[in-house]
Image (tube, grey):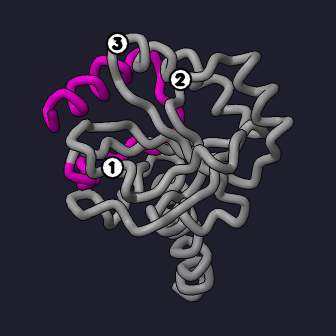
Amino acid sequence: MKRVWLWAPFAIFITLIAVFAAGLINPSDRVVASGLVGRAVPQFALPGALDPAAGLSNQSFGDGKPKLLNVFASWCIPCVAEAPALMQLKNQGAEVVGIAVHDRPDALQKFLSENGNPYSAIGDDPQSRTQIAFGSAGVPETFVVDGSGIIRHQHVGIITPDDVPIIMAKLRAVE
């Protein structure tokens, strides 16, 4: 009987490790949604990433036209993989605006020339303050914003070709 009690803590420890590992490997929800979905775009004003005079601000979202706001960076490998899907969205009529985080104009220009430019405007967010204000956890991340400036949907991670119809449907639903 003593042997059983000696091994009991070890058995409990192994069981806990297995439960935690299962949760990490296959979580029930992989997305941490922004607390801003359903709320107005936070106040911000960014200079243009390529042309300082052509910036982006919260005022850009109240013109009655829905937009996709894509948080990205030229140094982001997943952002390169996402670029064709963003071009597809643009070609289907979506207005895409961007926030470039921790980027340099020369690197951004190279990124856009190599991968296409779906953006009607790109704001420069060198310290990620605006990215954080949106509740964005990383790059890439995309928000559907209605014509009144209300965030209606958040897509965390790469937009794939399979996601394009879903995002277009969400964008059209807020027109």
The residues bearing labels 1 and 3 have C-alpha atoms spaced at a distance of 20 Å
Q: Is residue 155 above or below residue 45?
A: above
- Could you classify mark 1 by the number of other residues whose Cα lies within 10 Å: few (under 14), some (14-19), or many (20 or more)? many
Question: Does the magenta segment cover residue 42?
Answer: no
Residue 14 on image: x %, y %: 58, 66
The magenta-colored residue range is 148-175
Circle 3 residue:
92
Q: Is residue 158 or residue 12 the one in the foreground?
A: 158
- Could you classify mark 3 by the number of other residues whose Cα lies within 10 Å: few (under 14), some (14-19), or many (20 or more)? few
* Identity, as a three-letter code, of the amino acid under mark 3: Gln
Residue 166 on image: x %, y %: 27, 25
Q: Is residue 23 or residue 101 the one in the foreground?
A: 101
Is label 1 or label 3 in front?
1
Label 1: state its secondary structure. helix
Label 3: state its secondary structure. loop
Residue 11 on image: x %, y %: 55, 71
* Identity, as a three-letter code, of the amino acid under mark 1: Phe
| Disc assigned to residue 61 | 1
Q: Is residue 144 visible?
A: yes
Which comes sooner in the sequence, label 3 or label 2?
3
Q: Is residue 139 visible?
A: no
